[in-house]
Image (cartoon, rainbow, N blue to C red):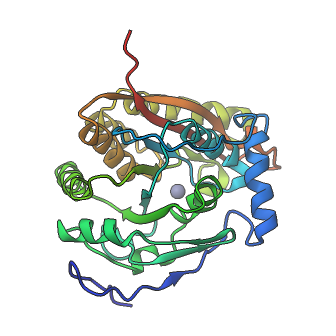
Amino acid sequence: MSSTIFQPNSTYSFQCRSPLCLYYSSSKNQCLEQIISSYIHPFGPGELPLSITSKSDLFIPCLLVPHGAYCDSGPLYAHAYYWLSKQTCTYDSALILGTNHRGVGSSIALSPDHWQTPLGLVECDTELLDALVSVGIPVDREAHRQEHSIENQLPFLKHLLPNIKTVALSFSSLSIDKAYKVCEQIKKAIQKLSGKRIVIISTTDYTHYGPSYGNRKQQQLTDNEQYARLCDQPILKSILSNNPEELLHIQQTTQHTMCGLWPTIIVLILSKLLNDDKGQWKLLCYNISSEIMKRNTVDVNGFASLVYDKLVKN
Ligand SMILES: [Zn+2]
């Protein structure tokens, strides 16, 4: 199927993108139950999110969250959305940066669609979409059709902020120069929308290891858990030091199996660019999938939630 490229300020042929529901329930009640149990899970924040207040704040928070199945990584999503609930601002819109696992369509792809979720519709923010298109970022519906990394954020987001709008932007393979260029474009687009309160949500999962991923050297769960931790440590360190070049170098030289390299690089660059370097990345949690849900498998995934928070002045 060919890609559809839209021009700035055109009349969008909005569609409603149906949820794939591969990693959470399509039933409203069961989906809500999965979200709530993620918040109160022993590996989660331990309580439900707070009601968000409506003070004004120029800081644009950035989240880097998992997109695994809720049964494996829901409590880690919950840590990031709980953190967001503690910020002193309500949000009009979320720009969600996802990974294009299959490499279908444009390597940089805005979605022109509204997103249906089991908890109701999340509308596309047409104002933000137009601004992003006007600075040259392409729209490609096909890149989003079978992808789950952005979709998986929406039930948590809708539960926390029922009226929030969103724009979805996915990435497959880029170059570091292209990544810096698209971040400058995003900054320019956001600057056109003074007064709109935006949160940036990006997503990656870390080490994928075990027989199901084609790795047969290790067979013991504890060995595989240890291997994932060892692989993920330098990756997390480069994120915490906000060093996209180092992250790229480590991923390439170690053949690290994180699936959201480019959305991670983009959010690192953007966090600094949008906030004049007045924040810092913090690790909220890191766990291996097997710790969250004990299963009869030796396959392991590393999951983490990180946030770009304001620098605390001493
Ligand atoms: Zn993935």
Q: Nearer the viewer, residue 232 or 156?
A: 156
Q: In which quadrant of the rendered image does the N terminus lie? A: bottom left
Task: Give the quadrant of residue 207.
Answer: top right
**Residue 265 versus residue 101 in the image, above or below:** above
* Residue 100 visible, this orientation: no
Horizontal and vertical percent position of residue 280: 38, 27
Horizontal and vertical percent position of residue 67: 57, 54
Horizontal and vertical percent position of residue 211: 66, 53
Residue, x 35% and y 46% (percent of image)? 267
Q: Nearer the viewer, residue 120 or 221?
A: 120
- Locate residue 107 relative to residue 284 in the image: left or right: left
Q: In which quadrant of the rendered image does the C terminus lie? A: top left
- Locate residue 240 relative to residue 164 in the image: left or right: left
Residue, x 60% and y 33% (percent of image)? 286
Count the marks: how many?
0
Residue, x 58% and y 55% (percent of image)? 161
Task: Give the quadrant of residue 279.
Answer: top left
* Residue 264 visible, this orientation: yes
Residue, x 45% and y 74% (percent of image)? 144
Residue furthest front as drawn? 55
**Residue 167 versus residue 66 in the image, above or below:** below
- Locate residue 227 relative to residue 177 in the image: left or right: right
Horizontal and vertical percent position of residue 137: 23, 68
Task: Give the quadrant of residue 98.
Answer: bottom left
